[in-house]
Image (cartoon, rainbow, N blue to C red):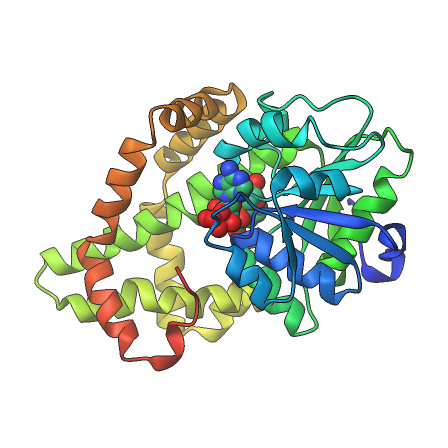
Amino acid sequence: MKKVYKEAECSTGALDGKTIAIIGYGSQGHAHAQNLKESGLNVVVGLYEGSKSREKCAKHGLRVETVAEAVKQADVVMMLIPDERMADVYKKEVAPNIREGAALAFAHGFNIHYGTITPANNIDVFMIAPKGPGHTVRHEYQLGRGVPALFAIEQDYSGNARDIAFAYGTGIGSARAGMLETTFREETETDLFGEQCVLCGGVAELMKAGFEVLVEAGYDEENAYYECMHEMKLIVDMVYQGGLTLMDYSVSNTAEYGDYEVGPTIITEDTKDAMRVALKNIQNGNFAQRFIAETQSGQVSLKARRRLEANHPVEVVGRRLRGLMSWSGDIEV
Ligand code: NDP
Ligand code: MG
């Protein structure tokens, strides 16, 4: 069994008196920057001139500089801009300005693993990858809790990379929940697999398929939305608390019986074969290549698909029904 590190074994000590540059103020960036600051560490946010997030940072009491200037001041540079923009920003603004012996950090291994960023060998390179969206990283921290994280050390030039990574993970609250050691390769491959096959791709298609089958059979869209999408959270909350055992304990015997009998006819060996193909395409770099090519051609099909998905009937009815629950709209998109 692999060791999971907890707060008692970690501290923010290795970052005392150091400056951490958070590059980007999006999902992860806003969470890391504010959590680290509230953990007593010195944070500067790096954003391009004209970024719409400059104002938000100022409102949150954070110092903002250009990316180049933030990197110059930093002992740790955490890259929290979209993965597909990182190689360019690294080449133009990070590499020429990062100090010898400083640390370059990532929340996902994509660019290091697929070789789009090759860091200088006189810096540390580590990863702290929270296993949750940025808004949860922030929210849990504010509740005195944390989101678990994976950590990995790719380069240890200073000899302190591990302590610095632990300090960073402690500062964002992850050590409260648990930190598991991994490699850039393993994190990248499992993370892409999870989001494609289970968390985003798998769950989204499952919910849409259920909704579509009910609606085409003549049931109300509202009913289909409540059943196939709204209730997903309630089920996942139980799984999060106590695994499938708690879910099966909490749902009715009728539901439990149906789960065992029908579930395996929906997610079949064919589904697993499709997952195996997806995993191969992650391992051999085909998926990464396609995503990089999509970015080079302006992400045209990604944007078109995003528009199409936003107009799916489950989204249209969902927006209306969520609008009736005043407490459900508190994340800005
Ligand atoms: P976002 O898409 O939320 O990051 C957007 C931020 O980057 C914005 O502040 C944006 O500026 C800024 N930005 C975009 N381009 C540039 C640029 N050229 N120079 C400077 N800043 C720029 O990223 P995420 O938080 O989703 O992802 C960051 C990293 O974290 C990725 O490696 C991702 O894989 C990883 N990760 C993400 C998770 C998530 O939940 N989202 C979960 C775990 C890991 P503006 O504000 O002006 O738009
Ligand atoms: Mg993930």
Residue located 71% across and 31% down the image: 97
Residue at 91% from the left image edge and 34% from the top image edge: 159
> Looking at the rendering, in which quadrant would you find the N terminus?
top right
Residue at 78% from the left image edge and 44% from the top image edge: 2
Residue 25 placed where, x, y %? Answer: 55, 52
The quarter of the picture where the C terminus appears is bottom left
Residue 127 at least partly seen: no
- Please tell me which residue lies in front, 70 or 175: 70
Left-right relation of 282 to 154: left
Question: Which residue is drawn at the image coordinates 81% and 58% (left, top)?
Answer: 6
Front-lying residue, 237 or 249: 237
Q: Nearer the viewer, residue 168 or 264?
A: 168
Number of numbered discs on residues: 0
* Image x and y of residue 294, in percent: 36, 26
Q: Is residue 195 above or below residue 295?
A: below
User: Does residue 11 appear to the left or right of 78 in the view shown?
Assistant: right
Question: Is 190 rendered above or below residue 33?
Answer: above
Horizontal side of 144 relative to 226 (left or right) equals right
Where's residue 86, x and y in %? 55, 33
Report which quarter residue 30 is drawn in: bottom right
Specify the farthest residue to the left: 218
Q: Please give left or right for residue 307 compared with residue 3 in the image.
A: left
Q: Position of residue 85 (x, y in %)?
A: 50, 33
Q: Is residue 265 something one can see in this rendering?
A: yes
